[in-house]
Amino acid sequence: DAGVTQSPTHLIKTRGQHVTLRCSPISGHKSVSWYQQVLGQGPQFIFQYYEKEERGRGNFPDRFSARQFPNYSSELNVNALLLGDSALYLCASSAGLSQETQYFGPGTRLLVL
Amino acid sequence: GQNIDQPTEMTATEGAIVQINCTYQTSGFNGLFWYQQHAGEAPTFLSYNVLDGLEEKGRFSSFLSRSKGYSYLLLKELQMKDSASYLCAVRDASGGSYIPTFGRGTSLIVHP
């Protein structure tokens, strides 16, 4: 069975640009969460989606947005990129909302110049 | 909010036992997770505790005391491949969301 997949694996952008990151959850999983991880820190929660509805939002500015599609895949959008947005963006899927076991994708490494 | 504290770095010898501690403060505790993360890779799930006590899974065990806001991850028979960052995450269910907050991680270095 395929695990969580994310695309692209790496991305280089310049300040002010926007970026769209994609995630496909494990088949049958309906919950997708997005995290930002900067070097030396633990993952920081950005969004959780379940059954195509936003169920949780972390302490991130409105430049960050996300959505979940009918097939449960998800996109994370970041507008007006800042240098500080450079990080590893992780997607995690779980079967249900309460996330007893959350499976992470390989991440997208974003570099903002 | 939540406050999660774990040591920044630990070193141990191959074959030995190491205990990584995690303390937390949260208003709506709904479970504690441990993840392993090798450099440049995504976190992988190790354990989940929601009730007090010890959960054993092979060489890895995790303990939880909700009254003390304390957990530890115990790694036995250490192997070189256990060198990684170990993340403690606490889930808060207040407000109807199930959002885990991660600590900064403990970098474990296993020496021959």
Image: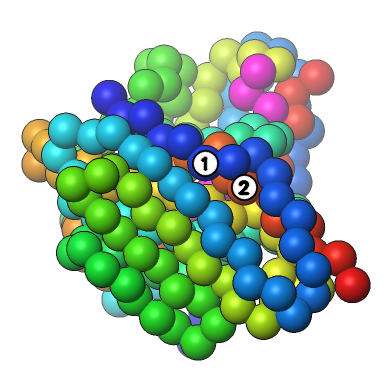
Q: Which residue appears at 44% of the width and 46% of the height? A: B22
Give the CA separation, mark 1 to mark 2. 6 Å
Instruction: Identify the magenta region.
Output: A84-91
Residue sitting nearer the eye, A54 or A36: A36
Callout 1: chain? B
The answer to whether B111 is drawn above or below residue B96 in the figure is below
Q: Earlier in the sequence, mark 1 or mark 2?
A: 1
The answer to whether B30 is drawn above or below residue B52 in the figure is above
Residue carrying label 1:
B6
Residue carrying label 2:
B106
Residue B21 placement, left or right of B62: right
Residue A88 placement, left or right of B57: right
Task: Tell me which amino acid carries mark 2.
Answer: Thr
**Residue A29 visible within the image:** no
Residue A62, horizontal then vertical, whole percent:
38, 16
Residue sitting nearer the eye, B86 or B68: B68
